[in-house]
Image (cartoon, helix red, strand yellow):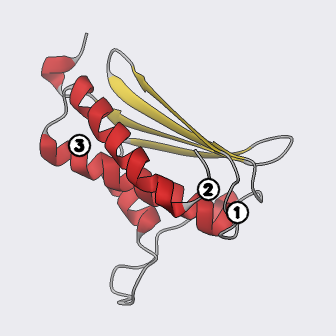
Amino acid sequence: MSSDAAFLRVLRSAVDQICALAGFSKMDSSKIVLAVDEACSNVIRHAYKNKPGKPIVVTCHILPTKLEITLTDQGEAAEISSIQPRALDDVRPGGLGVHIIRTVMDEVQYENLAAVGNRLVMCKYLPKENRS
C-alpha cells in the first residue's frame, strides 16, 4: 500500500477479513485491526515523515498456530531500542501505538533491514479450536 493515511481504511477492512478467515472472534479481530492500523500509522509518521506515495508492504499468513502479519517499509531506519511504549499515566493525546501493538499481539519483532528500511513482524496465536 501507499504511505497515504487514506489507504488505512482499505487495510483495516482486509485485515478484518483475514482475521475472520483465521477464526478470530469479532472482538479479537477488532483488536488486531487496531494494532495493524497503529503500526502502519507509525510507519507513515516516523519512517516516512508523513510523505505520501512511499511503499508499505503488508503480508498476512495464516499459519497452523498463528496469524503472522509483516510490515516492511523503505523509510528511515528506526532506532530499535527507542521503540518503547510510553507510561500509561502520562495522559496526553497520541503515543499509545506501541503499547497497543504489544498488548494485542502475542509476538512483536522489529528489525532494521540491511539496505534500507524496517520490518515489523506481529503474530497472534489462533484460537485453540482453529489450530491445525
Q: Earlier in the sequence, mark 3 or mark 2?
A: 2
Whether residue 91 is visible to the viewer of this picture, yes or no, is yes
Q: Residue furthest top?
A: 132
- Is residue 1 depicted above or below 53 in this figure? above
Quadrant (top left, top right, bottom left, bottom right) of the N terminus: top right
Q: How many marks?
A: 3
- Is residue 82 depicted above or below 127 in this figure? below
Q: Residue at x 13, y 38 (%)?
A: 25
Q: Earlier in the sequence, mark 2 or mark 1?
A: 2
Structural distance between the alpha carbons of marks 2 and 1? 8 Å
Residue denoted by label 2: 3
Identify the amino acid type marked 3: Ser
Identify the amino acid type marked 2: Ser
Pointer 3: residues within 10 angstroms few (<14), some, or many (20+)? some
Q: Quadrant of residue 77?
A: bottom right
3 vs 37, nearest the viewer = 3
Quadrant (top left, top right, bottom left, bottom right) of the C terminus: top left
Which is in the foreground here, disc 3 or disc 2? 2
The answer to whether the residue labelled 2 contacts the one labelled 1, judged by CB atoms less than 8 Å apart, is: yes
- Is residue 101 depicted above or below 92 in this figure? above
Pointer 2: residues within 10 angstroms few (<14), some, or many (20+)? many
Q: Residue at x 39, y 90 (%)?
A: 92
Whether residue 102 is visible to the viewer of this picture, yes or no, is no
Structural distance between the alpha carbons of marks 3 and 1? 27 Å
Residue 85 in the image, given as x and y percentages of width and height: 47, 69
Residue denoted by label 3: 29
The answer to whether the residue labelled 3 contacts the one labelled 2, judged by CB atoms less than 8 Å apart, is: no
Q: Which mark is residue 94?
A: none
Which is in the foreground here, disc 2 or disc 1? 2
Residue denoted by label 1: 48
Q: Earlier in the sequence, mark 3 or mark 1?
A: 3
